[in-house]
Amino acid sequence: MNNGLEDVVAAETVLSDVRGAVGQLIIRGYPLSALAGHWTFEQTAHLLFTDFFADLPDAAEFAARLGAARVDVFERTQELLGPMSKLPAYDGMRAAMAMLPDDTALPDALRLLAAPAVFLPALIRMQAGDEAIEPSANAGHAADVIRMLGRSDGARALDTYLVTVSDHGLNASTFAARVVASTQAGLTSSVLAGLGALKGPLHGGAPGPVIDMLDAIAEEGDSARWIDRALDKGERLMGFGHRIYRTRDPRTDALKAALRSFGGVDARLRFAESVEQAALDALHRRKPDRVLETNVEFYTALLLEAAGFPKHAFTGVFAMGRVAGWLAHAREQALTGRLIRPASRYVEALTKDAA
Ligand code: ACO
């Protein structure tokens, strides 16, 4: 028995393979380096969905239908977004997604794929006192997100980010989505489970705190001292460490390359690299027996900051990409027809005889 289920194989999948020992991520036969920066998010989602939906059109038609789904989702929920905008952006997005029909056909999947891209920019703008901008069916998915944020640059980098995080083996949120799908519940239910698991700082909640860490270190002016103090207090450094990778997370470099496409980020990047080095030095010194390297969240934080997302919304952007993997995994699991129902070991009676 191990509490974290490490090394337990709980599913067979054709979707992705996280090769932790060599720092490689394979998505449906392609190494991440062949997809990130080369394929669009729509093409990647189409690749992930292949074989899991009976009426899947070709990639071009799929992209067109995703554009139409963005408009559909916006129109269905427009008047409900006001109350949702009182919640933190991630929670508002999750509440809005819970309003979508909960079935398992392609139109359901397309709505759920579209939904974070529509809701998150709308909620960010409404919270800033601005009007939500309607989606455009004809725009590329990432370009439409940037447009709905009210910005004009960063579409290509965001597209690279969404592809990079679209799927990643049996991570906690994907496992949660598969557990729900194994009960033959609808796709909305699976995606809501994924959203719940992604939110925590040990999974998708880390990039906002990465910015907090960078800001605190910038104010103090001494990376090593700040890092040592945090580690002395038993805190974890956000953006470092991984359950599977025993080397550098390959997504880190894909994101760093995309980040360089923004003008004016050189100084921020140099500073982040110096903090990264100080963090790695401290982690290697303190835990020489553990491989603690930079994970995807460190450069995610910088990329999403450069793209204009507020840090409280970073986890929502992660969901915008990972929802593609959740949906494909949910269908893959449901098609096995097998309920996931592990056993527990009873260790001690908590209640005694009431008498
Ligand atoms: N900072 C400081 N110490 C760390 C860190 C870190 N970021 N990560 C692991 N450690 C330490 C642990 O305290 C532990 O020490 P111990 O053996 O003395 O108790 C040791 O390294 C091993 O840690 P585990 O908890 O066994 O590693 P696990 O595989 O469970 O953790 C995790 C993976 C949760 C990602 C962890 O590295 C962490 O908390 N990182 C910080 C949060 C973060 O970056 N989250 C995003 C992850 S990426 C993603 O999900 C998309």
Image (cartoon, grey):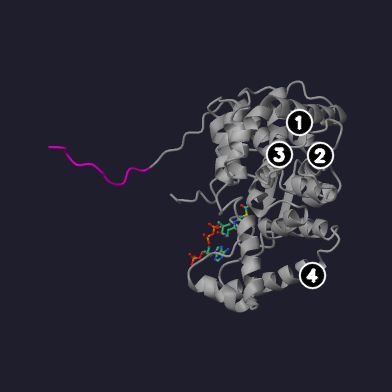
> How far apart are labels 4 and 2 at the CA level?
28 Å
162 on left or right of 58: left
**Looking at the rendered structure, which numbered label has been put on residue 144?**
2
Picture quadrant of residue 272: bottom right
**Looking at the rendered structure, which numbered label has been put on residue 122?**
3
Q: Main secondary structure of the magenta part?
A: loop
Work out whether residue 169 or residue 177 is closer to the camera in this orientation and state it: 177
Which label's residue is closer to the chain start, 4 or 1?
1
138 on left or right of 149: right
Element at badge 3? helix
Element at badge 1? helix
Q: Between label 3 and label 1, give the one nearer the viewer.
A: 3
Residue 110's spot in the image, x, y percent?
Answer: 73, 28
Kindly check if marks 2 and 1 are in contact, taking CB atoms under 8 A apart as contact.
yes
> How far apart are labels 4 and 1 at the CA level?
36 Å
Which residue is identified by label 1? 70
Which kind of residue does numbered mark 1 sit on? Answer: Arg
Which kind of residue does numbered mark 2 sit on? Answer: Asp
Q: Indicate yes or no whether the magenta region holds residue 12.
A: no
Picture quadrant of residue 181: top right
Kindly check if marks 4 and 3 are in contact, taking CB atoms under 8 A apart as contact.
no
Element at badge 2? helix
Residue at 53 percent across and 71 percent down: it is 231
Which residue is identified by label 4? 267
> How far apart are labels 2 and 1 at the CA level?
9 Å
* Segment colored magenta: 345-355
Residue at 51 percent across and 33 percent down: it is 340
Q: Is residue 122 visible?
A: yes
